[in-house]
């Protein structure tokens, strides 16, 4: 046995211990929650905001950063507020979930309440994710490696690192729950509405939910020709889109709510900058997962499953490339996280158990070793 094989086998045995026994999903969720903060050893910048959070909440007795907008909006759900451009506060007009919960429950300590809730739901997310991934992979070790790989990108880390009130985790969680409860149309509709009204970028990301509901059942059945099958859950997605669109129209045209986006010309500037650094902007959204994305695409191409390739890649790129028009491309691009589930399902069928395990181990190592690029005090807007 070579030295490399020795360490590979050691890593597999180490991770494998966490998926033994009846409570393996619980142990895996705990491992993920521990790994996330440890993964910041190579980029400490995101951790510096915890000092600012402490100053705002404890010393100044105020809400920290974007949680201030939650407090404002909770006091006046349909009002207009004048926030400074480029602050991150000016484009949150229709992100109403946290303000509405704050108002209904009479929450006083908004920052602390929502951050603690985020930590609790983060654990629940990893627990549910373990079951969801195991359904796709039918292998506990591979499930653990895939979960750890997701810990190394913003999707897995945001439950811990986002203490500023962006609320990305809640949108990711709601989108995931729409998939998790995909056989219950009412829950699909409910969780999608929560995702949309928490962050409009989830609207674009929900295209992958719709595609999964159409594609995955036929993929499991090994259908030779993919048919246009419309299910109640798919209808729930369409209705969720229509309700959100109608709600936005009503709030803008009837209630007079006006989003205060950044100055004219900002999008054009961002697109130009994104083109000049496109490799960074795309790679750092999903890091090592790109290996599996490319492999899955090649598999579909070689199998001549062109329709599936077109629809899946189109829905995924809509989110990934849509992030090119704004500053925080890593955070925005992760709204396409459901693409990882497609890639796992496609690769699982074509690779041997050993091959699948090795590639997931490699992806997990790449994602955990690569610095998380959602925040940096270095130079370069694309690091966001």
Image (spheres, helix red, strand yellow):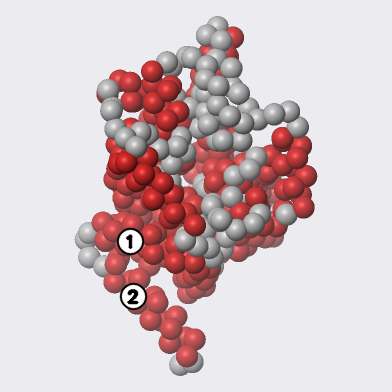
Tag 2's secondary structure?
helix
Is residue 320 rendered to the left or right of residue 199? right
Question: In the visual, does 229 lie left or right of 294?
Answer: left
Position in image of residue 220 (x %, y %)? 49, 50
Task: List the residue tagged with mark 2.
Answer: 14
5, above or below 57, in the image: below
Q: Residue at x 35, y 33 (%)?
A: 62
The residue at 63%/27% (across/down) is: 261
Label 1: state its secondary structure: helix
Residue placed most toward the observer, 290 or 165: 165
Give above or below for 146 relative to 109: below
Circle count:
2
Residue furthest left as drawn: 22
Looking at the rendered image, the disc whose residue lies closer to the viewer, 2 or 1, is: 1
Estimate the spatial distance between the alpha carbons at disc 2 and disc 1, rounded to whole Å: 15 Å
Residue 11 on image: x %, y %: 40, 77
Side of 335 relative to 309 (left or right): left
Q: Quadrant of residue 315?
A: top right
Task: Report which quarter residue 226 is drawn in.
Answer: top right
Q: What residue would you read off at disc 1?
A: 34
């Amino acid at each position: 046995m070579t030295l490399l094989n020795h360490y590979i086998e050691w890593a597999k045995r180490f991770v494998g211990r966490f998926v033994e026994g009846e409570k393996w999903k619980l142990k895996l969720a705990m491992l993920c929650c521990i790994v996330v903060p440890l993964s910041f050893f190579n980029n400490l910048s995101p951790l510096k905001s915890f000092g600012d959070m402490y100053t705002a909440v404890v010393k100044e007795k105020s809400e920290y950063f974007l949680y201030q907008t939650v407090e404002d909006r909770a006091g006046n759900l349909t009002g207009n507020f004048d926030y400074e451009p480029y602050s991150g506060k000016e484009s949150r007009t229709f992100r109403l979930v946290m303000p509405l919960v704050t108002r209904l429950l009479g929450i006083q300590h908004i920052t602390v309440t929502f951050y603690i809730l985020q930590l609790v739901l983060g654990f629940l997310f990893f627990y549910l994710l373990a079951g969801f991934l195991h359904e796709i992979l039918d292998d506990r070790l591979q499930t653990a490696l895939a979960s750890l790989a997701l810990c190394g990108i913003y999707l897995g880390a945001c439950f811990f690192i986002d203490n500023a009130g962006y609320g990305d985790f809640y949108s990711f969680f709601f989108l995931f729950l729409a998939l998790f409860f995909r056989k219950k149309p009412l829950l699909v509709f409910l969780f999608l509405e929560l995702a949309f009204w928490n962050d409009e970028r989830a609207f674009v990301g929900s295209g992958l939910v719709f595609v999964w509901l159409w594609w995955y059942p036929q993929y499991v059945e090994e259908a030779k020709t993919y048919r246009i099958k419309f299910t109640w859950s798919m209808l729930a997605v369409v209705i969720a889109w229509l309700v959100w669109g109608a709600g936005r129209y009503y709030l803008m045209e009837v209630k007079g709510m006006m989003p205060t986006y950044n100055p004219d010309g900002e999008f054009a500037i961002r697109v130009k900058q994104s083109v000049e650094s496109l490799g960074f902007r795309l790679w750092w959204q999903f890091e090592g997962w790109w290996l599996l994305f490319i492999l899955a695409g090649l598999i579909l191409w070689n199998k001549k499953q062109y329709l599936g390739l077109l629809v899946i890649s189109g829905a995924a790129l809509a989110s990934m490339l849509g992030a090119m028009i704004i500053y925080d491309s890593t955070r925005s691009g992760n709204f396409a996280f459901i693409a990882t589930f497609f890639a796992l399902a496609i690769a699982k069928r074509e690779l041997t158990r050993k091959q699948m395990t090795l590639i997931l181990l490699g992806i997990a190592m790449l994602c955990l070793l690569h610095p998380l690029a959602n925040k940096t005090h270095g130079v370069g807007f694309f690091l966001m």
